[in-house]
Amino acid sequence: MKGSLTLRVSLAFVLIVGLSAAGLGCYLYRDFVGEIVRRDDIALRGKLRQVQQQLASPDAQSLVRDHPQYFRDTMSGQENSLVRVAAPDGQVLLDINAPGEHYPLPPAAAVAQGALLSWTSRAGAPGQVVSGMARLGGRQLVQVTVARVYADRTAMFARYRQRIVLACALAAGLAGLLAALLLVRGLRPLRAIAAHAALVRPGRLDSQLDSADAPSELRPLILALNAMLVRLHDGYTRLSGFSADLAHEFRTPVNNLLGQSQVALAQPRSVDDYEQILASNVEEMERLSRMIDSMLFLARASQEDVAPVRTTLALADEFGRMAAFYEGMAEERDLTLRCEGSASVQADAQLLRRALANLLSNAIAHARTGSVVTLAAAERDGWTELAVTNAGSPIAAHDLPHLFERFYRADAARTAGAGSTGLGLAIVSAIMALHGGRAEVRQAPDATTFVLRFPPA
Amino acid sequence: MHILIIEDEPKTGDYLQRGLRESGFTVSLARSGREGLHLATEEEVDLVVLDVMLPGMSGWEVLAQLRAREGTAQLPVLFLTARDEVQDRVKGLELGADDYLVKPFAFVELVARIRTLLRRAPARDDALLCIGDMEIDVIARKVRRQGIPVVLTAQEFNLLHLLARREGQVLSRSLIASQVWDMNFDSDTNVIDAAIRRLRRKLDDPFAQKLIHTRRGMGYVCEVSA
């Protein structure tokens, strides 16, 4: 339970409520105690005045002398006050002190101010004492001292404190319990998400989490999870579609290999025939091998496992090299290769050549006989654009968005020749992605242009 | 020249042995790493072709052991791998391998690499190459047949020079693309075929003796055919 949110929040609630209740309790207790003490002090002073008045009555002197028990009853009262009347020379005229407590006699200064003095009883209870002067029977000046022991008050305060502590503990416990209950309820949507996530598996990636009932704090999480599921679903669909495509693409060359080898073995043939068949097999296998290479390249590029080694490349030089490489092929199809513009890009030489070679192979294959294939470089808004343009029948508009997808063939009859792997443009796109750029296609009525866009260095 | 092949896959081992024998090498074949190590120390071996994915003792271990032993520490090793991962290549070269090929590879490519490693690639660096009735002046970049000048473009000359320097050796299309145009990837093979056709039109078509020959499924060779 160390990592339990419920436990931690509940404990925090217990602490917060416990502390605030204790603070409040302390405040109220101190206030209460102060009030009680103040009242007791007033009562003690009142008692002093009462005794002073009784002593001032004309017959007080004889009463003190002859009937001290009268004073004992009337002066001590229900509060069991201790009363002492003494002459200025120290002679004690009256001392009501049944428990035999020793309380201090306030000094003259305190007497003059009527100040209270604290003392402690033999049983350890707090006591107060106050003195005043009086005219005994209206004549003799005496010092009257009244004292009290507050044993019952101390016990009451103790009980009060206990109740406060109990109330604090109860409040804290209740708060903790409530917090736990609220959290368990509040986290229910999270458990729903967990239950949903447990059901997610390949092929069921499209089921989305319901965000309608979720609290607003959890909605961003649910939306993010749903977006993640969409991405996973897309990736998974693409990947499984890709695997299926791959299997299909492999079928043709494997079928050729199998078929022609079996036909060859069906009856004895001349050495020339065998050579023909073997050479044809080699061609098919080279096609398979190229396909595997391209696939691996794409797989690595998509995992960003290919690190382009960027150097500054003068495009005029690169175009010249490409034109030289393709001059034989262009000549056979009566095409002219034209290089235009000069700019430079920061790019991996081999990757750029590979991309350009793929575009030029396509351009030469699809160019109208006798036309011009153009390689052009230009700067536009800080981006460097390499354009390969060929004249020829336009690519259908519905094919344009899919041209850079793996194994997408706009015109199966024309491009599915022995050399084509259907991956050329996907590789071009991957190479541009590795460089932080884009590959695009622009279709004019009579010319198709593939553009490689490199971002500003 | 004695080549030791360490390869557990039966078909691969058999065709490598046969092909290298027919290319003029003495060949021993070991079907496991342990056997290979034994043969490498017992026999006078000049080069090892090592498959890295061997059962039991892996190719990497074999390579490390070869390098650790005194007699075989300098023995050229070319390793074959089906895993075209950068780490694999780096690992092999770090362990002291001299070269590598990724499966599937063209057989002529393997032979070319072996010849280079053995420093037996009969590449001719002469200033004047003569093949049949053809003379190539490498410095002046001029070609004559039967004394008649043949006018070639720069690319055509480079292509011819490559083929002529490696007279009698079959050169794969990818090797030609890499050497002549610096295209080090599997490019459109039609490009090489077109370039060769163009060269032939100028060099071979006007003359009875043909010098550039197609080896179907393998590549091209320049020689006076028997």
Image (tube, rainbow, N blue to C red):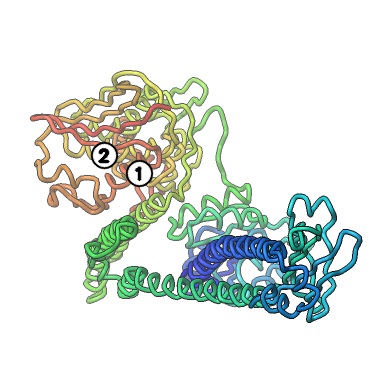
| Viewer-nearest residue: A206 or A314 | A206
Above-or-below relation of A305 to A273: above
For label 1, the residue is B187
B120 shown above or below B41 = above
Left of A442 or right of it: where is B186? right
What kind of element bears circle 1?
A: loop
Output the chain of dot 2: A
Residue under pointer 2? A361
Amino acid type of the residue tagged 2 in the rendering: Ser
Residue B38 seen: no
Contact? badges 1 and 2 (CB < 8 Å): yes
Please name whichever residue, A87 or B57, is drawn nearer the observer in this view of the structure: A87
- Left-right relation of A390 to A149: left
The part of the image, by quadrant, that contains residue B30 is bottom right
Residue B174 pos. (x, y %) = 41, 46
Residue A294, percent from left and from top: 35, 52
Crowd band around label 2 with a 10 angstrom C-alpha radius: few (<14), some (14–19), many (20+): some
Chain letter for mark 1, please.
B
Q: Mark yes or no: residue A406 visible.
A: yes
Q: Amino acid at mark 1?
A: Ser
Q: Nearer the viewer, residue A416 or B5?
A: A416
Q: Which label number is shown at residue A382?
A: none
Tell me how far mark 1 sits from mark 2, CA to CA.
9 Å
Q: Is residue B123 left or right of residue B219?
A: right
Residue found at x 30% / y 61%: A215
